[in-house]
């Protein structure tokens, strides 16, 4: 009997250590295992999408790669976990992934009650509607009585409800578990309209058999600042993910990119640039990283502009204009605090 | 004095019953303690991570729509109300699925035993195909391959006031007017009359041996009395007719394709298993029973109904119960094709909006546990009723 009690108690103690483990220093865990476990989408072209060889690309994937470059000097030290919208927060809360970079909207409720922290915004988005051209719809305000398909477990679901309520319009909601099946339902004609973030609409439209038969309506019905998410309470880890993003924006502003970063590091006399690239002092120390953390991000992943152009820019299948995601100096809202 | 005391304690401890009780109590204490420890540990860790706990969220406005709601529901209602809506959807699809699967299963089970070669082979093909393909795949098949081939709303197939298209089956919606109470009263009255008729017929048969077609007679009674009540009250029903609008057919009643796909997939899949159970049950009744019944001069239909089926049911009911339980639990797959049942609404949307995984998953587990146990209890009662009563 006694030994049984002992066994039970030790089991309970193990359970206790496992569950508190999640709150411990993520950086130490990541360094110990040698890679970052990064939660991404199940396939949104331009944001996180795997090719036939299983190589992940996209703006959200690059957020993980930048963090890996900062820590290991190796942007490939990332393993990806594809997650549906409804699985993503639980996966992060439970410690299954180290960071979530899955076109996730920063909202009050998510930031305050889910035990999560948003780090930075890597894409400013807004929700829109896509409809078949032959319906002749020109505005989202024409959608009274329409059937609307969307993916489950997103802010999209709530914004859609608010939008139709606000304009006193009727609609039939068809809410599907996964984005691909929601799109399939739309493509099959179950719905008149497909709704998600506008970047997502462009990405999904590129997957349809005849992209030109569909039109993205002009209205943007919500603010959707998307960015990487980490667990609440690990401030050091949050700082690393946040500043990996800020470095990319600052680099673009300073005119540093993946091609010229080596040259600038050896030649520049600008003390700000020398500090950032680790030629002088050790800015990385306060993050628990090496002096060349920012250099590695820029050299391996590139600055924000390069990341944008490579993944979602006008020359990609997604083909989004830079628009609001341009630097603040260029008329957009991308603005990062200075590295100093 | 003290000697006596210590020996009485010894006696108490040496009693096997007392010792068992003490050990049980100790074990219970340990289980409670460990449970409490794990629970408080969970609470502390959730608080540490800044995750909200508790069920207060059920009173918060939900803000999301639900496609199918049998009770009044809008986005302004609470998560609690959305939970009830989803619960009703799960229970409705489970019960309808069970009823339909039983009918399909019995028909197919009998068909497999048929002397008609074609009928028997067709039933075999049905059973072997459907029970060997994963249910989720069958749902996708019905939803994406079959129902999606229907025309778009603009080109709906129209029979009178019925519309059929990709968005569902639209039919006139009866709206009751003043005076409908008379019809309801007539209906209830006719049901009471039929029950009395059946009881009387049974008693008379036991007493005199004379048979009376009580079931057909009561069926007729219900129809005639209800119809008379309708005439007397002047048909107090108006129909809300479906009409084409810009995007959809509006008005009337609609049966959405999600509902149809889930119901068809669940009932045909489980029906294939039930068919095998029914076949096994009937084959388990010794052929001698049928021969004996025939030699007593019973008709074939009566032989089946009075001799074979009651004995077959004893073999059929226990495995049938597990099929019913499977069906109720499999209804959760409806989430994959947008049928708003419990898993879709609670573990999908609500969990995601509130982030409270433990509460929401707990709620779902509680509901499925309760639903399964209720079905199981009913079937156990029915099994007991049907079991061999030895005299």
Image: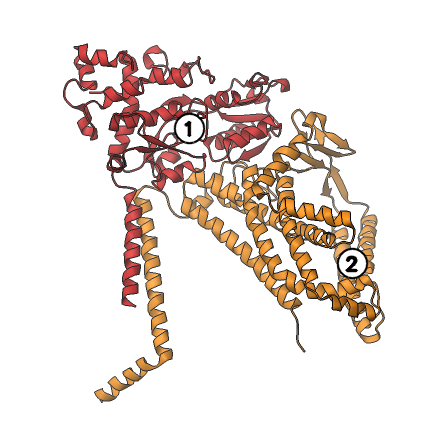
Chain colours: A red, B orange
Up-down relation of residue B16 to residue B225 (above or below): below
Quick check: A329 left or right of A193?
Answer: left
Kindly indicate whether the residue at mark 1 contacts the one at mark 2 (C-beta within 8 angstroms): no
| Chain name for mark 2 | B
Spatial separation of the CA atoms under disc 2 and disc 1? 68 Å
Question: Would residue B167 be visible to someone looking at this image?
Answer: no
Residue closest to the eye, B294 or A231: B294
Query: Residue A32 in the image: x percent, y percent?
Result: 25, 37
Residue B119 in the image, given as x and y percentages of width and height:
76, 48
Please state the chain letter of the residue tagged with numbered disc 1 in the rendered image: A
Can you see residue B213?
Answer: yes
In front here: A137 or B274?
B274
Res A263 → quadrant? top left
Q: Which residue is mark 2?
A: B190
On the image, the x and y values in percent for residue A4 come to 30, 64
**Residue A54: numbered disc:** 1
Is B103 located above or below residue B165 in the figure?
below
Report helix, strand or loop for mark 2: helix
Disc 1 residue crowd, few under 14, some 14–19, many 20+, Cα 10 Å: few
As drawn, the residue found furthest toward the left would be A281
SS class of the residue under badge 1? Answer: loop
The relative height of residue B176 versus residue B377 in the rendered view (above or below) is: above
Q: Residue B173, percent across and down?
A: 71, 39
Please identify the quarter of the rendering in which residue B69 is found: top right
Q: Name the side, left or right, on which A107 lies relative to A142.
A: left
Mark 2, Cα crowd under 10 Å, few <14 / some 14-19 / many 20+, is: many
């Amino acid at each position: 009997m006694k030994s049984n009690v002992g066994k039970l108690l030790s089991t309970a103690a193990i359970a206790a250590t496992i569950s508190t483990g999640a709150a411990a220093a993520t950086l130490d865990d990541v360094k110990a295992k040698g890679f970052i476990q990064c939660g991404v989408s199940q396939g949104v072209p331009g944001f996180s999408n795997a090719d036939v060889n299983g190589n992940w690309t996209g703006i959200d994937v690059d957020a993980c790669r930048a963090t890996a470059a900062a820590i290991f000097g190796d942007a490939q030290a990332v393993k990806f976990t594809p997650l549906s919208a409804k699985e993503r927060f639980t996966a992060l809360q439970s410690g299954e992934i180290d960071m979530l970079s899955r076109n996730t909207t920063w909202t009050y409720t998510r930031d305050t009650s889910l035990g999560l922290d948003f780090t930075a915004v890597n894409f400013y988005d807004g929700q829109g509607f896509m409809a078949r051209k032959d319906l002749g719809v020109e505005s989202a305000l024409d959608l009274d009585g329409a059937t609307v398909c969307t993916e489950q477990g997103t802010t999209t679901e709530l914004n859609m409800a608010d939008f139709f309520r606000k304009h006193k319009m009727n609609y039939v909601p068809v809410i599907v578990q996964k984005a691909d099946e929601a799109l399939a339902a739309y493509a099959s004609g179950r719905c008149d309209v497909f709704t998600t973030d506008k970047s997502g609409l462009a990405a999904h439209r590129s997957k349809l058999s005849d992209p030109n038969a569909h039109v993205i309506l002009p209205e943007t019905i919500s603010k959707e600042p998307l960015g990487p998410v980490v667990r609440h309470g690990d401030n050091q880890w949050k700082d690393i993910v946040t500043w990996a993003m800020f470095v990319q924006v600052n680099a673009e502003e300073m005119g540093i990119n993946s091609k010229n970063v080596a040259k600038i590091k050896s030649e520049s006399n600008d003390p700000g640039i020398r500090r950032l690239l680790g030629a002088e002092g050790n800015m990385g120390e306060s993050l628990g990283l090496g002096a060349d953390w920012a250099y590695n991000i820029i050299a391996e992943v590139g600055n924000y502009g390069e990341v944008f152009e490579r993944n979602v820019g006008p020359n990609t299948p997604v083909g989004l204009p830079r628009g609001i995601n341009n630097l603040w100096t260029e008329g957009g809202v991308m603005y990062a605090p200075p590295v100093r | 004095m003290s000697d006596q005391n210590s020996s009485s304690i010894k006696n108490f401890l040496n009693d096997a019953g007392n010792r068992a009780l003490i050990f049980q109590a100790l074990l219970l204490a340990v289980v409670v303690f460990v449970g409490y420890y794990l629970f408080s540990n969970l609470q502390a860790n959730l608080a540490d991570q800044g995750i909200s706990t508790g069920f207060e969220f059920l009173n918060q406005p939900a803000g999301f729509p639900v496609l199918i709601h049998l009770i009044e529901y809008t986005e302004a209602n609470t998560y609690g109300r959305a939970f009830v809506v989803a619960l009703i959807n799960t229970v409705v699809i489970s019960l309808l699925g069970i009823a339909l699967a039983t009918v399909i299963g019995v028909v197919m089970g009998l068909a497999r035993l048929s002397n008609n070669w074609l009928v028997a082979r067709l039933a075999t093909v049905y059973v072997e195909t459907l029970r060997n393909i994963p249910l989720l795949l069958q749902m996708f098949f019905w939803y994406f391959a079959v129902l999606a081939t229907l025309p778009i709303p603009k080109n709906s197939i129209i029979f009178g006031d019925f519309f059929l298209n990709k968005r569902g089956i639209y039919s006139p919606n009866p709206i009751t007017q003043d005076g409908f109470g008379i019809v309801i009263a007539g209906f209830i009255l006719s049901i009471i009359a039929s029950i009395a008729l059946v009881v009387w017929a049974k008693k008379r048969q036991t007493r005199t041996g004379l048979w009376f077609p009580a079931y057909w007679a009561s069926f007729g009674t219900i129809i005639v009395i209800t119809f008379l009540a309708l005439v007397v009250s002047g048909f107090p029903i108006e129909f809300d007719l479906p009409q084409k609008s810009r995007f959809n057919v509006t008005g009337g009643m609609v049966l959405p394709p999600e509902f149809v796909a889930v119901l068809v997939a669940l009932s045909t899949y489980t029906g294939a298993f039930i068919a095998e159970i029914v076949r096994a049950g009937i084959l388990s009744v010794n052929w001698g029973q049928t021969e004996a019944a025939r030699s007593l001069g019973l008709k074939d239909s009566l032989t089946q109904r009075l001799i074979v089926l009651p004995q077959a049911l004893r073999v059929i009911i226990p495995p049938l119960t597990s099929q019913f339980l499977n069906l109720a639990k499999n209804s959760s797959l409806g989430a994959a094709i947008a049928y708003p049942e419990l898993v879709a609404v609670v573990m999908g949307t609500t969990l995601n909006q509130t982030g409270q995984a433990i509460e929401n998953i707990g709620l779902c587990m509680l509901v499925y546990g309760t639903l399964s146990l209720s079905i199981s209890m009913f079937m156990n009662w029915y099994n007991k009723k049907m079991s061999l009563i030895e005299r």
